[in-house]
Image (tube, rainbow, N blue to C red):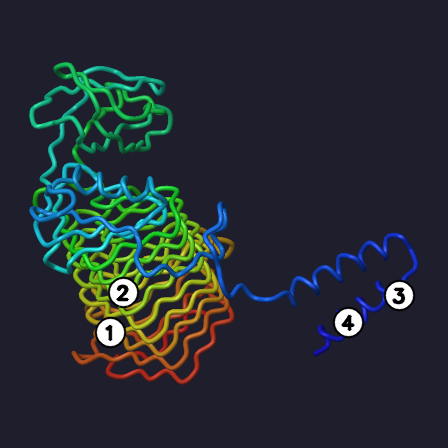
Amino acid sequence: MYSHSHNLNRRNFILASGTGLAAGYATIATRTSLAEDRPAVKFPRATSGDTAAEPNWEEKLSITVGPKDADIVGTSQKALQAAVDYVARLGGGTVKVLPGEYKLRNSVFLASKVRLLGSGDESRLIKEPSISTKLAADSDWYDQEITLDDAAGFQIGDGVCLRTKNPHNGGTNILKRTLIARSGQRFKIDKALRENFWHVGESTASTLFPIISGELIEDFAIENIALDGNRAKNTNLDGNYAGCIFLQDCSRGNIRRVAARDYNGDGISWQICHDMLVEDCTSRGHAGLGLHPGSGSQRPVMRNNKLADNDIGIFFCWGVKYGLAEGNQIKNCRLGVSIGHRDTDNLVVSNDIDSSGQSGVLFRPERGPGFCGHRNVIEKNRITNSGGDTGIGIDIQGGTESITLRSNTIRETRSAAARIGIRLGKETKDITLAENKIEGVKTDVSDLRI
């Protein structure tokens, strides 16, 4: 009320002022008022460059892909990519993936305003087995070619992951590229290396890639499709680079009713992606993370998903803010939910977290209070049978501050052993516990600050 009156008084003052500057402000204020009162768009027309008021067309561009009786007949990534590129060139539309098994040697790269729509479990995209070899010759950062030690099994069009040890700091540099030309063991790649791949770095090439990729796209959807990572026949590539779905620098994507299974890495990973919705999906059997809202991602919504048999169910990476994890079923993961490096102002509510190997919910210790995940709310979750004999339902570590744990049920149906319901680290501050129900553990709340 005070703010509203203050704005009115300030506006009246500006309108009443006789100075030139005040008169200018008055004009702006009047324009703003008129803009707010203008008529709504009731009868939109398709107008060049106008994406805000598009008519609701009864039919939209759609193309089918499948093993037969489709607009594009085929079961490789080339057929799927051709369909995506076709609708993208015309401004967007739907690619319908008909029932069948699609065996991929490279990612399907999505585009803005494209919807990839499968036929449920009957549309199954399978990653082909990976092969790896050393690089036989040095390539510098400006080169656009590599030489393989053993080129057997590598084909033009393959997606490859290049790895090398950085000679300056000992870390690992990783790039994803596509093979586009060859002469014997020499292959041209689609983009320059931009890193040095030398013998001294023990450089390698492997046919590793996400099943579905997106980079610098917006307003897209992946729906009702099955993704098989073929984990037993592929080497590991972590979720900062791959997964059944991997997205980088994207906005406003919807992932619904996707079954992501058995990737030797993450299930669904998105990095620096904003306003992402992941809903009614299954993500299970991955070596890495079930859902990976990645660094810098703002306002992710993860709702009603089934996450099982992963290392971590939901991993809030670095700087994930204003997110919602609601109504998810998380089972048989080492950690149910992990929150850490500057992951602030998130709500984790009404999830079932069952049989975690270590903890149901973990707030990571990070490098000190300035790096921890503050101002998060953990509410109305049901956390059952966490960890071994020393397992913890909710474990808040490091200098984490301003956390609310409200109306959660933490239950242990095995023996009490040395299990703990809630543990508060000695450096934590401003932790609110309200109406939580804790059953069957040895210690309901272990407060190391005391």
Q: CA distance from mark 1 to mark 3?
A: 72 Å
Sequence-wise, the earlier of marks 2 and 1 is: 2
Q: CA distance from mark 2 to mark 1?
A: 20 Å
Position in image of residue 197 (x %, y %): 28, 22
SS at mark 3 in the image? helix
Closer-to-camera residue (154/13): 13
Position in image of residue 443 (x %, y %): 31, 78
SS at mark 1 in the image? loop
Sequence-wise, the earlier of marks 2 and 4 is: 4
Q: In the drawing, what numbered circle is on residue 301?
A: none
Sequence-wise, the earlier of marks 2 and 3 is: 3
Closer-to-camera residue (435/240): 240
| Other-residue count near label 1 (Cα within 10 Å), few / some / many at <14 / 14–19 / ≥20 | few
- Disc number lying in front (2 or 3): 3
Q: Which amino acid type is shown beneath numbered disc 4?
A: Leu
Q: Which amino acid type is shown beneath numbered disc 3?
A: Ala
Q: Residues at badges 2 and 1 in contact (C-beta under 8 Å)?
A: no
Q: Residues at badges 1 and 3 in contact (C-beta under 8 Å)?
A: no
SS at mark 4 in the image? helix
**Residue identifier under label 3:** 16
Position in image of residue 58 (x %, y %): 32, 61
**Residue identifier under label 2:** 336
**Residue identifier under label 1:** 418
**Residue identifier under label 4:** 8
